[in-house]
Each structure stands twice: as structure tokens, then as C-alpha cells.
């Protein structure tokens, strides 16, 4: 991949342009309020729009809600132009057996041609009954066995959120369910499909959509298998895309000068000091939140309070107590 | 002929839910709801720094993290006698309010609206049920799609509002034990106000009128789904000076109103995949112990009951208890679309309010009511005010809290021993509406409301999903 595609700034110019053009096309359509929306959409559909099955495991749906906050490209574009969301429990029209059978059929037809997104942790204990995602032909589908069945046929698996990536809060100390992240589960089952981790509790929408765009761009240039392989080369040792997770929060923190000067905040409400002394986990948390900011860039974690290290593989146990200095 | 149907997954909701229905003569005769996922937060919380709970509990629900954060702080502040400054209460109300708007708009537009219109012929709008019973004409369908797409941006704006004082959403940083961590500047207030105005215009011009219109188009669904017709609210949005709740606490049962008493809340587990010892009062029930082979059990949800009664909770219950004033749009549109004059909520009548369309319409009305209240709180904010009280040493204490999440009532109980959480019990939203049967065998509120729902086509039981989504489970 070239430099522009893996740089740690916001989405590359090329992708940004592409998505902006699509926004304009969609707005043009919807503002006219005509019922010809369907045809107009078909005209602008991106050639490369692979099916995506989004499975929800042991989590809180926060990653899906965060996905809805995508602004550039906005979520309507993501759903209508960037990917084909063939299965997403929170968004799809269909329900029940029809939805499950459609996914199973599409997976068969599109062997190695679909993307699997997993949100939430997975557990095999009690025959997977800690998380059942549906039923078809009077057969129950626990997440664990569904994942084991579909994943070998997927082109790649995106583990979105810290639960899917590393277990997260669902697998925190005290948990009795045996919940774990997708990569650990694959290792256990001998599944070799490439996994891209997009941690964060929840992940920033740009991390999810941006990774998808990077992947689709690579796939468009190189084909599915080679494209996935190219993306896999731009991950860090914990499976995270360097484009978004290449720096610590601390390195890019606008309050770094306060840290360097030793000016520490007295309370969370004290904005004249660095939050490190109050427990900020920024020095060990790898993501671009300080540059990217959240929710239309209005704010971010440390500006408001402090970093709790939610992108880290050992979140929450290794990052707590959240409001006590515990790094060095 | 009698048949048993299973809808699994029930889609376009938060969480994992299965509905099993006995259907004969085109009507649901009996219903069982299965909560299909368990993580065990009460086990995970034990032994942690009590201040960490505010972050951990938010991961129970990515749609309503603000309410869980708030409930956790209120319980801790109750245990250690912390008084939150007035500005802290206002900021919490504003974040909680912004998330009410976000959640209600999500519930109707992203989750439920496809029950009433067909989107473009592309996923996620297709495939869908074989007989979706769509009745809107071409122009109204185009309008619904337009509103669906517009609502995506409006909902994100609501999250921006919550993030202005909360840092980010979902999973807010700005609600912390002692108050709120945000600074209050003129820019914060202005940024919040401009977004609130946009959202409010959407609520007034789109969301509320649409629900009155749909209640006429689907007049049959404005008469079915009554269920127990009990209602409960534990109170939410305290007045910054008096503490009086904007949506007050109360219980409605058997056609009468009673004051809400937290001691009357019990968790039943006879039909849940937990040992019998896992039930009891949320003030002292142990963390749930799983038993997936328990005979007769069919859900990971416990059954929360008030004085042994199933209670409907959520927007329609809150507005019914408070007998809230209808929005100006509602007062104008009710005669036209509902065929009745009404200025207050209870005047809409029990049959309508406790119906599929009534519950949806209540959510729209509450969205307006909360947006309206938020403008008042915003006016009381002044730059430079402190929103955070210092905490004492958190060594030993016990406390509880009550608040309302957008979808329904919430209760947290905690005990702290030697500076660590020794006990934590969360009575989340789902345990009320989506509960299985209780120890006495009474159906949960949604199960009861499903009984009698028309299913004209057994291959496409769309009314069941419509009813479930109207509850926002």
C-alpha cells in the first residue's frame, strides 16, 4: 500500500473525494423526495460492494451505534454505496428464519467473497448457549458454532470493538462465561481466515469505516485475496490497522506540554492541568482520538475527563482503576 | 389449525431476543420471549474500585450508556452522601436528555420504521418478510425514506450534543461520581443550543406528525396489543433546585395510581436460566448463578415484578403516570388522525396508549417533551460554573439509585467494603418489559401484549415484531 493509504491522518484524499461525491449524489436524490430513489441509487452503486454479514456476539451494540455516527462518509453512504449489509441484526428489514437462511445461502454462494464482521465476544462454553444469534430449520445457532461455520469461507474477518478483538469487558475478571476475542477463538478452532482487529469501546466510526474503505480499495486494485493480504501487512502486532492505531494518545495529546512541564490537574474538572496524575491511560493507549476527535469532532475523551485505555488488549482489567495513576 | 412459530432473531432491537408464538385462528394465543445472551456484570463488578463502576456498567447497553453511568454515580453518591452541585445536575440532565432524543429517534426510525415502509431494493432494506403489510402510497413511502435518511444525521447530532458535555458517545466520559467533569463555557452552551434547535425542528416537523399520521393509517394497530396495561415510572430528570422529577415516579395498576416504593421490587427467576437462589430483592440478591439446564426455564432475563405484578415501563408508562401535556402538534393533530380531542396524555385513553401505535406515539411525544425541557436547563447554565463535588474516601457504604433509561426504568444497588465493590445489582431495562413468566406463572408485559395480536399470515407474522419494537426492548 502506498503512503497516502496508510498515513495516520484522517481518510486519504482519494477516499475522501470518492465518499464526498457519493454524499452529493445521495443528497441530490433525497432532497427531491421522488420515488425514483431506488433507480438513482442503482446508478451510483459502487462496482465493488461485497456482502457483509455483521454478527453480534456478547456485547452491548455500542459498536453498531458508533458505526451509525459515521459522518465522512455518512452512514447512509456506507450502507448504500460502500458495502452491502446483507446481515445486520440492528438494521436489516428481515427477521427470524428468513434472515438466517439468507445469510447462510449467501455465504455458500459467495465463498471467499464476503466479509464477516464480529461485534462482541464469543464463548463456546455450555455449547455456546451464552449467546444464541438465531434459529433456522428448528436448529439453534449459537454465535460460536455459526462463526466456526462461516469464518473459513469469509475473505476476512473484522473484529470490531474491544470485546470482539480481545474479549474486553465481556471477558473481564469475574466473568463466568468463558468469553474471548475472535482471534483467540480462531486459534482454538484452527481457523486461518485473516482477522483485522478494530478495538475501542466502542471504536470510532472512522476506524471501522476507514478500515473497510482501505480494504475495499486494496481489493479493487489487487483482487480479494491479495487485497486482504495487503491490508494484513499494515497491521500492528495486535492486529490493528496502523493507519488509526499507530500512535499513543499521549504522543498526540494537546495537553502533552502540561505533562512535560509537570502541571497536573487537581480534579477532573480542572482543565488547566494534564490528567495523567488523575489516572489518564493515554501513555499506553494506541489510537488517534486526540487528532480525530469524536462525534463530529466536538470533543474527545481527555478534553472532557481522561483516557481509560479502552482500545488496549487488557481493557478493562489492566487499565483499571481508571481514576488512579497506575502506570509507572 | 394451531401452529408454533419462532422468530429468532427478532431484528431491529438492541440485544438478542427470540419470540415463540402459539398461533391459531389467525391470532397469537400464547407467547414466550427468550433473552439469548448472558455476560454477568454483577460478577464482573465485584472487587473493583467503586468509581470504575461508572465505566463498566455503561457496557451493559450501547444505546443507553448515559443512564447506566448516571445510575451508578447516583448509587455511589447515595452510599457516601455526596451532594452534586446544581450545575452538575443540569449537565447530567442535558446529557441524559440528549441520549433520550438519540435513543427515541433510533428506536422509531432506524429500528421500527421499516415495519411501515419499503426502502430501496438493496440491503439492509431487502430481503424482508413475504407479506409485510405495507399500506403507504408512493408519495408517503418516499417521505418515509427521506425521513429515515434524515434521521440518521439527526440522531448523530443528538450524540454530538451528549458528547459536548460528555466527551464522546457511546460510552460517555463526562458523568462521574460527584457530578460532571466538563467545563462550562459559552462555546459549549452555544454548540449545544444550535444542535438542539435542529433536532427539535425535526421532532416537531417530522417525527411527531408522522406518528399521528401512521396511527390513522394503521388504525387497527392502535387498538391491539393491550397486555396488562400496568405502568411504572421511577422518576427521571430532577429539577436542578428542587430535585422534583420532570417525569415523576408512580405505579399504575388495576386502573389506579399508587406511589412507587423501591422495596416492592423483586426479581423472579423460576423461568430464567439461573439457580433459584439468584432471585429476590435487588437490594441483596446474589450475583446470578447460571443453570442452562434448569427444567422449564427459557430466558437469560429475570422477571422483575412490582408487588408481584408485571409492569410496563418506558415512554408510554412515564407519560401515563405523569399525565403529561401533549405537544402543540399533538393537540392539533389528535382530532384529525385519532378522532379525539386531547390536551393531556391520559385523555388519549387506555386502549390507544397501551397499543402498538400508542406506544410508538408516546415515544415521539416524549421526545418533544424532553427537548423542550432541555431548552430550559440550557438557559440556566452559565459559563464558569463548577459541576463537580469532591468525593470523601470511599471505604464502606451502601447505596442505591433509581432513574429512567430512554427505554425504561433502571435501578442500581451497590455495597462497598474496604474501598472495593462487595456487591452490585443492576436491574436493567430489559427485566421489566421483556421478562419471561414470573414465579406465579404470569407472563411478562410483552408476552402478555402479544397474546391476541392478529397474525393473518403465519409465514409472515409481522405484527409480532411490530409490537415488540413498539416496546423498544
Image: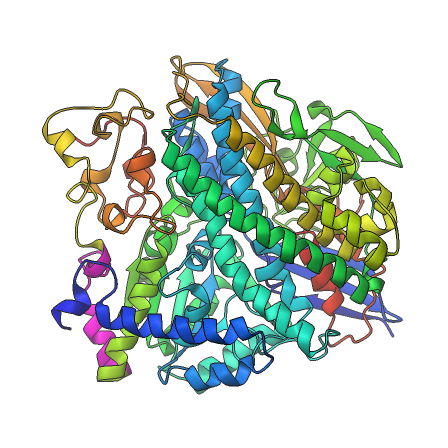
Image x and y of residue A303, in percent: 29, 36
Image x and y of residue A300, in percent: 32, 42
Q: Is residue A71 visible?
A: yes
Magenta span has B76?
no
Image x and y of residue A319, in percent: 28, 37
Q: Is residue B317 left or right of residue A153?
A: right
Question: Magenta span covers which residues?
Answer: A224-244
Q: Is residue A12 left or right of residue B107?
A: left
Residue found 79% across the figure and 47% down from its top: B331
Which residue occupies the foreground of this view, B252 or A160?
A: B252
- B77, above or below B404, in the image: above
Residue found 65% across the figure and 22% down from its top: B244
Q: Quadrant of residue B303?
A: top right
- B409, above or below B39, in the image: above
Q: Is residue B108 left or right of residue B90?
A: right
Image x and y of residue B203, in percent: 62, 52
Q: Quadrant of residue B255?
A: top right
- B206, above or below B144, in the image: above
Q: Residue furthest left?
A: A260
Magenta span has A231?
yes
Residue found 26% across the figure and 29% down from its top: A279
Which image quadrant: the N terminus of chain B?
Answer: bottom right
Which residue occupies the foreground of this view, A180 or B11?
A: B11
Residue found 34% across the figure and 35% down from its top: A304
Q: Quadrant of residue B55?
A: top left
Amino acid at each position: 500500500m502506498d503512503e497516502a493509504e496508510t498515513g495516520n491522518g484522517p481518510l486519504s484524499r482519494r477516499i475522501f473525494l470518492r465518499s464526498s461525491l457519493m454524499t452529493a449524489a445521495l443528497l441530490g436524490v433525497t432532497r427531491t423526495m421522488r420515488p425514483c430513489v431506488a433507480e438513482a441509487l442503482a446508478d451510483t452503486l459502487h462496482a465493488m460492494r461485497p456482502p457483509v454479514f455483521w454478527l453480534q456476539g456478547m456485547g452491548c451494540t455500542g459498536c453498531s451505534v458508533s458505526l451509525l455516527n459515521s459522518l465522512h462518509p455518512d452512514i447512509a453512504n456506507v450502507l448504500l454505496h460502500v458495502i452491502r449489509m446483507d446481515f445486520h441484526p440492528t438494521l436489516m428489514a428481515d427477521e427470524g428464519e428468513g434472515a438466517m437462511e439468507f445469510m447462510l445461502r449467501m455465504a455458500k454462494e459467495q465463498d471467499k467473497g464476503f466479509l464477516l464482521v464480529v461485534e462482541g465476544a464469543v464463548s463456546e462454553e455450555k455449547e455456546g448457549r451464552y449467546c444464541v444469534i438465531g434459529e433456522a430449520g428448528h436448529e439453534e445457532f449459537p454465535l460460536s458454532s455459526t462463526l466456526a461455520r462461516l469464518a473459513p469461507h469469509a475473505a476476512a474477518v473484522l473484529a470490531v470493538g474491544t470485546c470482539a478483538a480481545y474479549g474486553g469487558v465481556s471477558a473481564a475478571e469475574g466473568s463466568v462465561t468463558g468469553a474471548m476475542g475472535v482471534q483467540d477463538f480462531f486459534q482454538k478452532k484452527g481457523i486461518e481466515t485473516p482477522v483485522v482487529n478494530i478495538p475501542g469501546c466502542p471504536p470510532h466510526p472512522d476506524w471501522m469505516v476507514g478500515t473497510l474503505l482501505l480494504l475495499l480499495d486494496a481489493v479493487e486494485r489487487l483482487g480479494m485475496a491479495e487485497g486482504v493480504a495487503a491490508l494484513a501487512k499494515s497491521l500492528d502486532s495486535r492486529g490493528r490497522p496502523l493507519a488509526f492505531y499507530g500512535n499513543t494518545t499521549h504522543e498526540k495529546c494537546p495537553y502533552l506540554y502540561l505533562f512535560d512541564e509537570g502541571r497536573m490537574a487537581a480534579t477532573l474538572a480542572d482543565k488547566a492541568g494534564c490528567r495523567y496524575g488523575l489516572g489518564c491511560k493515554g501513555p499506553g493507549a494506541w489510537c488517534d482520538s486526540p487528532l480525530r476527535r469524536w462525534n463530529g469532532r466536538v470533543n474527545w475523551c481527555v478534553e472532557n475527563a481522561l483516557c481509560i485505555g479502552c482500545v488496549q488488549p487488557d481493557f478493562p482489567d489492566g487499565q483499571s482503576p481508571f481514576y488512579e495513576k497506575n502506570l509507572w | 389449525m394451531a401452529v408454533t412459530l419462532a422468530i429468532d432473531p427478532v431484528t431491529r432491537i438492541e440485544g438478542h431476543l427470540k419470540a415463540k408464538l402459539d398461533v391459531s385462528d389467525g391470532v397469537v394465543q400464547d407467547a414466550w420471549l427468550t433473552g439469548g445472551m448472558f455476560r454477568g456484570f454483577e460478577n464482573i463488578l465485584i472487587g473493583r474500585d467503586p468509581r470504575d463502576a461508572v465505566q463498566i456498567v455503561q457496557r451493559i447497553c450501547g444505546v443507553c450508556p448515559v443512564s447506566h453511568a448516571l445510575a451508578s454515580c447516583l448509587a455511589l453518591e447515595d452510599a457516601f452522601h455526596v451532594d452534586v452541585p446544581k450545575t452538575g445536575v443540569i449537565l447530567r440532565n442535558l446529557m441524559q436528555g440528549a441520549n433520550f432524543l438519540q435513543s427515541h429517534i433510533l428506536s422509531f426510525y432506524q429500528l421500527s420504521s421499516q415495519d411501515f415502509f419499503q426502502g430501496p431494493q438493496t440491503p439492509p432494506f431487502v430481503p424482508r418478510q413475504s407479506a409485510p403489510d405495507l399500506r403507504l402510497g408512493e408519495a408517503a413511502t418516499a417521505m418515509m425514506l427521506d425521513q429515515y435518511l434524515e434521521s440518521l444525521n439527526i440522531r448523530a447530532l443528538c450524540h454530538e450534543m451528549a458528547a459536548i458535555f460528555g466527551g464522546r458517545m457511546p460510552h460517555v466520559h463526562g458523568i462521574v461520581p460527584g457530578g460532571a467533569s466538563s467545563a462550562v463555557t459559552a462555546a459549549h452552551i452555544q454548540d449545544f443550543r444550535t444542535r438542539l434547535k435542529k433536532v427539535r425542528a425535526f421532532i416537531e416537523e417530522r417525527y411527531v406528525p408522522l406518528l399521528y399520521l401512521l396511527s390513522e393509517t394503521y388504525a387497527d394497530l392502535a387498538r391491539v396489543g393491550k397486555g396488562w396495561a400496568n405502568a411504572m415510572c421511577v422518576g427521571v430528570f430532577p429539577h436542578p433546585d428542587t430535585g422534583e422529577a420532570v417525569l415523576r415516579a408512580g405505579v399504575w395498576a388495576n386502573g389506579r395510581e399508587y406511589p412507587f416504593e423501591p422495596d416492592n421490587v423483586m426479581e423472579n427467576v423460576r423461568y430464567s436460566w439461573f439457580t433459584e437462589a439468584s432471585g429476590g430483592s435487588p437490594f441483596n440478591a446474589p450475583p446470578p448463578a447460571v443453570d442452562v439446564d434448569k427444567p422449564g426455564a427459557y430466558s437469560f432475563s429475570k422477571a422483575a415484578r412490582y408487588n408481584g405484578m408485571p409492569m410496563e415501563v418506558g415512554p408510554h408508562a412515564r407519560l401515563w403516570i405523569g399525565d403529561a401535556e401533549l405537544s402543540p402538534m399533538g393537540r392539533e393533530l389528535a382530532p384529525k388522525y385519532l378522532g379525539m380531542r386531547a390536551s393531556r396524555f391520559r385523555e388519549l385513553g387506555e386502549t390507544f396508549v397501551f397499543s402498538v401505535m400508542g406506544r410508538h406515539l408516546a415515544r415521539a411525544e416524549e421526545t418533544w417533551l424532553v427537548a423542550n425541557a432541555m431548552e430550559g436547563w440550557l438557559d440556566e447554565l452559565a459559563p464558569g460554573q463548577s459541576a463537580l463535588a469532591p468525593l470523601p474516601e470511599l471505604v464502606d457504604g451502601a447505596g442505591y439509585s433509581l432513574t429512567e433509561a430512554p427505554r425504561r426504568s433502571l435501578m442500581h444497588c451497590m455495597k462497598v467494603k474496604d474501598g472495593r465493590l462487595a456487591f452490585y445489582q443492576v436491574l436493567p431495562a430489559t427485566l421489566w418489559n421483556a421478562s419471561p413468566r414470573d414465579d406465579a406463572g404470569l407472563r411478562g408485559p410483552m408476552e402478555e401484549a402479544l397474546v391476541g395480536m392478529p397474525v393473518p399470515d403465519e409465514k409472515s407474522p409481522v405484527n409480532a415484531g411490530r409490537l415488540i419494537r413498539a416496546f423498544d426492548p
